[in-house]
Amino acid sequence: MVTANNAGAGELRAAARARAAVNAGELAVLLLGDQSSAEDVVQDAFLGLYRGASRLRDPANAVAYLRTSVLNGCRSVLRSRKRAWSSLIPTHDPPVWSAESAAMAGEDRREVLRAVARLPRRQREVLVLRYYVNLTDQEIAADLGVTRGTVASTASRALAALGRELGELS
């Protein structure tokens, strides 16, 4: 493990970039539901960060910029999918994450994922950022461009909606 005691500044920056890439990739997979689309979004986000690095006021904000870029890229992909699906299929189930993980996760996990996918976009994003990426409410607020109170109330409403929906399925 690379720490400040045993690494130079270059190694610390490389470790931070690797951690940011993993988090961005996991975030994209969770929001999009498929690996290849997630990889495309993350690659575009890193390319945007690279191209705009000279305009970045504070390099410490690079990870937050990357997360926001990934969120925006995922939103674009989801909008495109919604347009394509709405013209072909009146209603649809959310995409299956993968055959292997779906088989391993079991019916309960699939029910929760379907319920999360049916939440409004902001509620879905807040839950993923809070419980999967483990961001604080303040970090989520900065990434989404809202107040910390909005994050807290959105998370509360999302959890209540999930509880109602999953309770009805039992």
Image: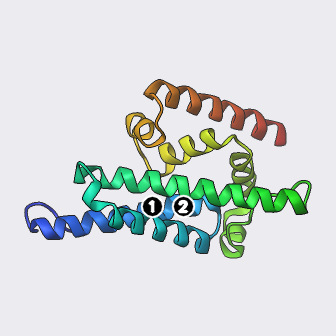
Between 144 and 153, the one lying in front of the other is 144
Placement of 127 over or under 93, stated as above or below? above
**Who's the residue at 68% across and 47% down the image?**
116
Q: How is the image coloured?
A: rainbow
Q: Give the labeled residue for mark 2.
A: 28
**Residue kind at label 1, given as amino acid type:** Ala
**Who's the residue at 63% across and 34% down the image?**
159
Label drawn at residue 24: 1
Quarter occupied by residue 47: bottom left
Q: Is residue 148 left or right of residue 80?
A: left
Q: Is residue 4 left or right of residue 30?
A: left
Density class for disc 2 (Cα within 10 Å; few <14, some 14-19, many ≥20) is many
Q: Is residue 71 left or right of residue 116?
A: left
Confirm or deny contact between disc 2 and disc 1 (CB under 8 A).
Answer: yes
Between 29 and 44, the one lying in front of the other is 44
Quarter occupied by residue 33: bottom right
Placement of 145 over or under 2, stated as above or below? above
Residue 107 seen from this side: no
Quarter occupied by residue 98: bottom right
Residue 77 seen from this side: yes
**Who's the residue at 67% across and 63% down the image?**
105
